[in-house]
Image: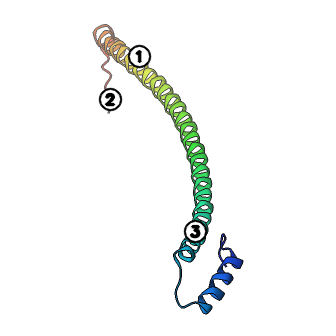
Amino acid sequence: MPIGYDKDMIKKNLKTNKNQASITRNDLGEMSQTIITAVDAVLNKRLKEVRNDVAILQVDARLIKKGLTDMEDRLRKDINNVQILIDGYVKAQEEFKQEFVIIKEEVRQIKTILKEKLGVEIRAI
């Protein structure tokens, strides 16, 4: 029998109903009260379960949010490190390019002097 039912009262009502042809207003009130009490007990139990489930979900949501925040922080640091590496690489390439331009001009000047002074022309294949 579900929680909240008064077994003795139900038995009494059943005996009374067998002995009487009709149910009195008082009997209906007692039966209704018993049903309401039983339904209220079941609903209160379910409400506690739902509140517990909600509390667990809130904790889970906070843990997930913290995990995502931690992951975002690590990703942000990794991106920053990659950006620093790329900036260093670009700077080194720029310096290499400038050095290459300087050496290219120096080689051109050396070739010009060799041709003018020694009559030797140097060419690539």
Q: How far apart in space, not on screen, are marks 1 and 2 (Cα)? A: 21 Å
How many numbered callouts?
3
Task: Answer above or below: position of 14 versus 95.
Answer: below
Checking the image for residue 124, the label placed there is 2
x and y, in percent, of residue 91 in the image: 44, 20
Figure quadrant of the C terminus = top left
Determine which residue is flagged by label 1. 99
Left or right: where 82 falls relative to 63:
left
Left or right: where 66 falls relative to 87:
right
Mark 2 element type: loop
Mark 3 element type: helix
Checking the image for residue 33, the label placed there is 3
Crowdedness near tag 1: few (<14), some (14–19) or many (≥20) residues, C-alpha within 10 Å: few
Checking the image for residue 19, the label placed there is none
Q: Amino acid at mark 2?
A: Ala
Cβ atoms at labels 1 and 3 below 8 Å apart: no
x and y, in percent, of residue 122 in the image: 33, 22
Disc with the residue nearer the chain's start (2 vs 3): 3
